[in-house]
Image: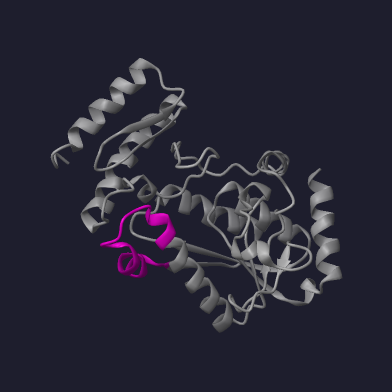
Amino acid sequence: MIEDAIEDVRRFSEENGLHEMQILLLFSGGKDSSLALYLLKEAGLNVSALTFFHRWSWRETLNWAMGFTRRLGVEHFLVDITDGLLREAVGRKGPVCINCKRVMLWNAKWFALNGGFDIIAKGDNANDKIIGALLDQCKGDIRLCGLPKIGVPIFRPLIMYTAEEVEGLAREAGIKPYRMYEHARRRQWREGCPLQYIDEDERVTPELMDLAYRVNYEVSRLARRRKVRMSVRVPSFEIICWNCDDETLREAEEIVSRFKGGGE
């Protein structure tokens, strides 16, 4: 199956002249973007990776991502967006993800234009499609969208694969991203940033961002040890968990209690 996927990317790229272009892939270090990077590299494309991080990003997943690109022999750019995220998020109500994505897309566009890249690639899969979204308004094959509003064509090599198919392809390719065992805001396992757990009716502050990082980092250590998925919303301190037993929840409550009232 993985060989078929590589051949599909190679054939599509030849038909659309992508082999002659420089491609910049937005690389989070998660399963989807890792598989997309693997396929583009194996298909013989000229691809580089771009990873955005900020003060509250998980360092463990960033370290894994850097090791993955080294193994593939792919040029990897790291960009700190802390200042831009603070400008966009502080004072607004959550979720922070909306503001963060705006900052990342803006930076990706200008990084590509100034760096001489012809194409921006993303790891979106078929489950990420939202009717009416900008990238789903493109004409023709939705894998490659040339949208004037963005200014750089967008290549989505996984958009025809479901999340389940992506999981199988990543497993076959031996791609095992580092897991923080977060609960995630969506049903799909979407890790990457503790700021997604700031309560939606709260106005974002740097102190709240720090709290979201600290409490979720401690809880993630428990979740990883217990092999469950768990996170904590702040400042409500609601524990959200899949497959937690009573003992695990008691341990989580002990961790959370240390943070209530500014204890840590």
Colour scheme in use: one colour
Q: Which quadrant holds the N terminus?
A: top right
Main secondary structure of the magenta stretch: helix
Spot occupied by residue 208 in the image (x, y as percentages of width and height): 24, 51
In the image, 199 versus 106, the foreground residue is 199
Q: On the rendered structure, is 188 left or right of 240?
A: right
173 over 26 or under it: above or below: above
Residue 183 placement: quadrant: top left
Residue found 40% across the figure and 17% down from its top: 245
Query: Compared to 11, does 127 lie above or below?
Result: above
Location of residue 81 in the rendering, given as x and y in whole percent from the top left corner = 39, 67
Q: How far from the left and from the top, in percent, is residue 18?
A: 77, 72
Position of 219 with respect to 173 (left or right) is left
Residue 83, by quadrant, is: bottom left
Q: Is residue 9 above or below residue 48?
A: above
Q: Is residue 7 left or right of residue 65?
A: right
Residue 94 belongs to the span the image colors magenta: yes
Which residue corresponds to the image point at 36% horizontal and 50% vertical from the top-left?
Answer: 195
The residue at the point 46 percent across, 49 percent down is 192
The quarter in which the C terminus is drawn is: top left
Q: Is residue 104 magenta?
A: no
Furthest residue toward front = 132
Q: Total label count?
A: 0
Give the residues in magenta: 80-99
| Residue drawn at 56 percent across, 44 percent down | 177
Q: Is residue 206 above or below residue 187?
A: below
Based on the displayed image, in which of its 4 quarters is residue 141 positioned? bottom right
- Residue 110 pos. (x, y %): 52, 79
Q: Front-most of 246 and 220?
A: 246
